[in-house]
Amino acid sequence: MYQVPDQQGRLAVVTGANSGTGKEAAKRLAGAGAHVVLAVRTPVKGERAKTEILAEHPGARVEVRRLDLADLSSVHTFADGLIADDRPLDLLVNNAGVMNVPRRTETADGFELQLGSNFLGPFALTVRLLPLLLSGPAPRVATMTSGTAHRARIDFDDLQSSRDYRPTRAYAQSKLADMLMTVHLADLAARHDWPLLSAGAHPGYTRTNLTTSGPTLNGGRPGLIESLAYRIVPSQGPEQGAEPLLYAATSPDATAGGYYGPRWAMVGPTKTVPLPRSGRDKGVAARLWAEAERLTGVAVPAEGH
């Protein structure tokens, strides 16, 4: 099992920290001494996760704050709260997401739900928190993507899947967008000589409620092939599935723009994974970043922080 290095004195924000890989990452970070903010859409669930973490690590510093990544006003409120605290942010873990929503659904801002929740919300959060991140000595942004991104492409002509919505394709595009965000943020850090390390991860096939909560939204049901795949594909628990993300977030061996996942694609200990060609396209990454700035109204200031 991956041992998280000492995190004493570090402030970490983990999105989607009330269950699955997010809760596991938050628990391990708190156990290593970090002050962890559980950024969750439903505070009651966040408080339950906090209680569970404190039961295992009684001396941990854990707090719950509300964040709905499908609502940019919530993203701004959450970021403003952290900025008002005026404390450097050492680690942002972009973990939260929604998967395979059966019918096209929109966020509060009119974005396709998977693109909005998985990419545009985390993008806005990351850029809004850049000043706090860059005020720390060795900040990191670790972003969860997915193996499905390897088969995806960014459709700039129908980014919101308005003309042709397919649940799995929209999900894969949103996770490729996360991959490209990770790469472009690493490029920005290098260009501006920021101390920030941006790295990505995928969890393989990890048993969490991600595989059921999305497909059952709006009364939907997972398809037959989907349901069979969930039963027969090799899988692992959140304890193992969170490790690539924890590695990206904390390992001294993680690199800028690095990408980490299970050794055997779906399961296993963490290893460095090569980015697919689509995830290495810096032209597409820059174009997508500019489009995300336009859609969210959030941009990196000219001076970088």
Image (cartoon, rainbow, N blue to C red):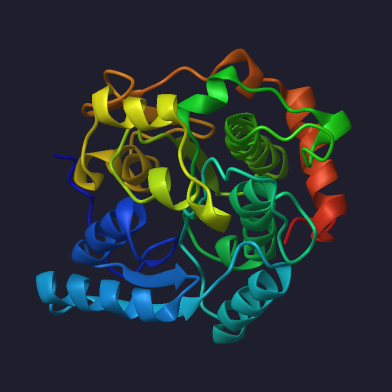
| Coordinates of residue 251 in the picture (x, y in percent) | 32, 41
| Coordinates of residue 36 in the picture (x, y in percent) | 35, 70
Question: In the rendered picture of this protein, how many numbered marks are placed on residues?
Answer: 0
| Coordinates of residue 84 in the picture (x, y in percent) | 61, 85
Q: Which residue is outermost to the top?
A: 277
Residue drawn at x 27%, y 18% is 264
Q: Nearer the viewer, residue 39 or 81?
A: 39
Query: In what quadrant of the picture does the N terminus appear?
Result: top left
Depicted 176 relative to depicted 14: above or below: above
Query: In what quadrant of the picture does the C terminus appear?
Result: bottom right
Q: Quadrant of residue 298?
A: bottom right
Q: Quadrant of residue 287?
A: top right
Depicted 19 relative to depicted 43: above or below: above
Q: Nearer the viewer, residue 242 or 161?
A: 161
Residue drawn at x 63%, y 22% is 152
Residue drawn at x 47%, y 79% is 65
Q: Nearer the viewer, residue 29 or 175?
A: 175
Residue drawn at x 22%, y 39% is 240
In the picture, measured across the screen, residue 29 lies left or right of residue 170, that is left
